[in-house]
Image (tube, rainbow, N blue to C red):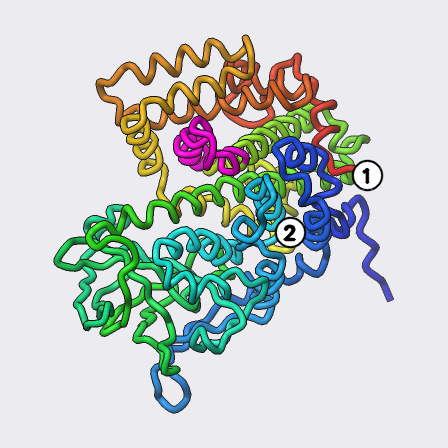
Amino acid sequence: METTPEPANQPPPFAGYNAWSQDTILVESVKREGGGWIAERADRLGELVGSERVQTLAAQANRHVPELKTHDRYGNRIDAVEYHPAYHELMALAFGAGLHSLTWTETRPGTWVARAALNYLWNQAENGVACPVTMSFAAVRVLRTDPGLAAEWEPKLLASDYDPRPLPISSKRAVTIGMAMTERQGGSDLRANSTQAAPLGGGEYELNGHKWFCSAPMSDAFFTLARTKAGLTCFFVPRSLPDGNRNPFFIQRLKDKCGNRSNASSEIEYRGTQARIVGEEGRGIATLIGMAHLTRFDIVVASAGMMRAALNQALHHALHRQAFGRRLVEQPLMQNVLADLALEAEAATLLALRLARAFDSSGSDERERLLVRLTTPIAKYWLCKRLPSVAVEAMECLGGNGYVEETPLARLYREAPLNGIWEGSGNVICLDVLRSIQREPESIEALVGEIGRGGDRVKGSVAAISQLLKETAGVEARARRIVESIAIALQASLMLQHASPEAADAFCTSRLEGDWGRAFGTLPAGAHCEAIVRRARLALS
């Protein structure tokens, strides 16, 4: 009987590596920015991220998508979402590792950088779980505006545990908190929200209305927006009431999303739903700005991690696949593509971790606070725009193999546009940058000073940015161009300070000085592609 021949010239499975200890650029960056003490925990997570176990769980959780069960078999309304066991295991791993809590539970310097390292690693493995992790992380800031609420919820919110049971907080080991903000008629224009809040007495309110996007609807509580007589107000909505009954919270349907399949996103209705005010009545958006700022920061870090994941897949394939008598990684044109991707990934990593350090220092350093306020939306916009291009180019490095579901790149490719859409799409983010500059003009000085650390090679960019900002006529229409210019200058400065000379030179020549084509793989002839690729490879791979 004829047998199928063993496959030839196929790369071995990309598993059994350590995404932390083998990533020289990441380890060096985290140490330099002040979070080096996380190394032991990051090593454990890095090993988990590179394991076949987590890769299998991620594939299962995204293939077997959540299902909505509006009623039980007796006809009772339950509004429950059922997840594949792989999703629950991933949630237990992420929350057990403290991805949601490290910033709030550690007192050592560099906690924002340390947590960013863990978040960067996790987003190389599975991205759906990152949504409830990020919301629970960011919720702490809003929760602390209400000391009574914080005293009740924060201990279990920060627990390194995961408890998906739909029970009152008093009966749970750990809880998660989500958000339900947007409505179908307004989307990002939250001022168009129409959900109504009526007082019940004793500080309690009753909500009635719809929300167009409610992510992770099985969370234990939500921050949401509704209107009182004073205007749009922030409310806290527990899913279970103290008497054990479920708070009215009707899940109308789950979104059939392009990516992010493991994570349920839903449309919901409040119908006599109990809630309490958080923050000042009538200033709901202002109350939630702090939470949105933190979720945007997480998106910056996640996008950088996802770029690294895409690059790792492309490098692994090119190292083991042969064509025309040589390994792909030895082919000059493929070297150019891989080096170009490596520059993009490293610049994203440096920007994300520099921003993390600014968060660490912002409480005591006014300059760093200004950098946080301005750089967060800049980095969010730019890295989210670059990620889809990186993902599709990495997929092309694998050819047809990159386009099938067995490789993580197909899932990563579908996931790539999401971060740019959630928590403020491109236009919203760029207009936020302009508003930040108008409100705090001194932030420009802090930004220019930061870019100037790159030396003489970025002086021209500083002058060009200053000129762009002086031209106030039609500034909104030019907002994207302004933000892009700032982001590239920031990345160039960081590359000049911290990358290898070969990588810094190639980045500046291509991105900053324009000697570049319109696609990856068009670095100039003088670029040291082989050296750039060699440094970007995971150690020992």
In magenta stretch: residue 370 = yes
Return the x and y of residue 44 as percentages of the image width and height.
72, 52
Query: In what quadrant of the picture does the N terminus appear?
Result: bottom right
First reached walking from the N terminus: tag 1 or tag 2: 2
> Residue pushed farthest left?
229
Does residue 278 lie above or below 372 as drawn?
Answer: below
Residue 211 sits inside the magenta stretch = no
Q: Residue at x 39, y 34 (%)?
A: 373
Does residue 282 sit above or below 357 in this rendering? below
Residue 445, percent from left and from top: 40, 19
Numbered mark located on residue 407 in the image: 2
| Magenta segment | 357-381
- In depth, the one of 511 and 131 nearer the eye is 131
Q: Amino acid at mark 1?
A: Leu
Q: Main secondary structure of the magenta part?
A: helix
Q: Of the numbered discs in the image, which one, if any, rests on residue 540? A: 1
